[in-house]
Amino acid sequence: MSFDALKDNIQREKEIVSKLKEVFDMPGVNERDLNKKKELAKSLMGQLVIINDSFPEILENIKMVKELPKLEFVEDKWEKKPQKETNLVSVSYGSDDGSGKTNITIKKRDKDRLLKEVNIESSSLKKIKKYTRVEDEKPVMQFKKPSKYISIANRLFLKQSINLSKSDFFISLRKEIKRSNMQIMLSSYLSVIFFTMLLSFFASVLIMIFFLFFNLSVLSPFILVVSENIFMRFLKVFWIIFAVPIITFLLMYYYPGTEAKSLGKRVENELPFVTIHMASIAGSGIVPSQIFRVIVMSGEYPHVSKELTRLINQINVYGYDLSTALRNSAAASSSEKFAELLNGMSATINSGGDLSDFLKKKAESLVFEYNLNRQKYNKVAETFMNVYISTVIAAPMILMLMMIMIKMTGFTDLSLDFLTVVIISSVVLINLVFLVFLHIKQEGMS
């Protein structure tokens, strides 16, 4: 029993120490998760103490040389002297990971206490594993295959795109793609631009052919046959062949910059709440590099998570230290405020300052700015509501009355149907402009 008991106890203690390390590395940050960790750690520490108490007596029973049996004279004959009763007992119980039985030797008085701690450990571990499984469903990084559209574009234009991507003309486009988190290489994006321009060229040819023989009208019939000379008509519409591909190129060239600005606004809207969350995590004593992983795993901040995923990859994939990863992510960020936060965190970590205190103060200023922006948005919405009422409701009625009076007086040859179409189209267009504007402003504040 002696050597085997010592071996089993040491093995169990190694398992407990390994589990304790896993517990302390777990990223739980709210009160529920912290309570689970504390309960499990307390149970493991209790088992460690019980096993340690058994070592002195186990070592006493270990003999390097096998002892001869001790005899005593009883009733005119020699008999083996009974061995001293031991206070140790062997305990066997199922392993919490289902790998088999765990055998240890402890003092008899600690048996019930040990089984109680084992039950607590098993219960707490199930809860934490459940939490971990939910967490694992949200990986930090996912790899996706390129779409068929991008694959076709790369087959046609990749070689030319790689050569062009090295030129200085596309340096700004490379930066905007990185800031917009589009997850596409510059060479592939150039291939997409060229392939889209090719498709737009064929579309422009079809559009030019249509307008070569037909024209559009706001009144019925809406499509009219052109009666003028075809050569003169061609001189009027041939520009479509060049205009459509050029407009396509400009739209796609400036799209990453527009996407970066839009993403920056969304990041800044989430930033006050993210900073509060990070401050609470930092106050719990967690490792600074794990703060960002917890934020990404929470799934509550989708736009900030894109920025933080890049930061985590800087550490885990490229092997940068935390301070360097913070500065690199700040340089590539789509939001100036978020870049300021990352640079501030880098400076605080390098100077040995209190990160939790820095994040709390930063959160206060960001929340204050957020409230001011909300108030400005409400005032702008009120102003545009008044403009909308006067422009879309009152103005068309007045304009319609004026048009009817002008028509009755005979000052114009325009038909009443044409005037009606113009007014209705104007109202629809104004409504669309207002809806787009309010949607953009609301998206920036949501």
Image (cartoon, rainbow, N blue to C red):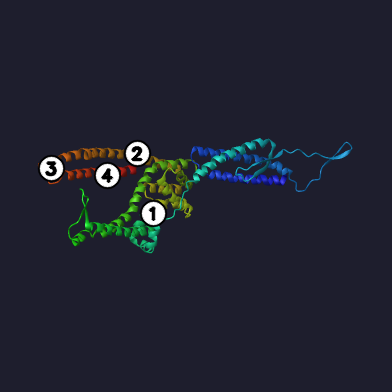
Q: Position of residue 284 (x, y in %)?
A: 49, 41
- Mark 1 Cα within 10 Å, few/some/many (few <14, many 20+)? many
Instruction: Tell me whether the residue at label 2 lies in contact with that at label 1, contact meaning CB atoms closer than 8 angstroms.
Output: no
The answer to whether one can see residue 67 in this image is: yes
Q: Position of residue 161 (x, y in %)?
A: 37, 62
Instruction: For marks 1 and 3, give the CA distance.
Output: 59 Å
The residue at which mark 1 appears reads as 178
Q: Given the image, on which type of amino acid does mark 4 rest?
A: Leu
Q: Quadrant of residue 39?
A: top right
The residue at which mark 2 appears reads as 371
Nearer mark to the viewer, of 3 and 2 = 3
- Mark 2 Cα within 10 Å, few/some/many (few <14, many 20+)? few
Instruction: For marks 3 and 2, give the CA distance.
Output: 53 Å
Instruction: For marks 3 and 4, give the CA distance.
Output: 29 Å
Q: Nearer the viewer, residue 245 or 85?
A: 245
The residue at which mark 4 appears reads as 432
Q: Given the image, on which type of amino acid does mark 3 rest?
A: Lys
Instruction: Tell me whether the residue at label 1 lies in contact with that at label 3, contact meaning CB atoms closer than 8 angstroms.
Output: no
Give SS at disc 2.
helix
Q: Earlier in the sequence, mark 3 or mark 2?
A: 2
The residue at which mark 3 appears reads as 407
State which quarter of the image contains the C terminus. top left
- Mark 3 Cα within 10 Å, few/some/many (few <14, many 20+)? some
Instruction: For marks 4 and 1, give the CA distance.
Output: 32 Å
Q: Given the image, on which type of amino acid does mark 2 rest?
A: Asn
- Mark 4 Cα within 10 Å, few/some/many (few <14, many 20+)? few
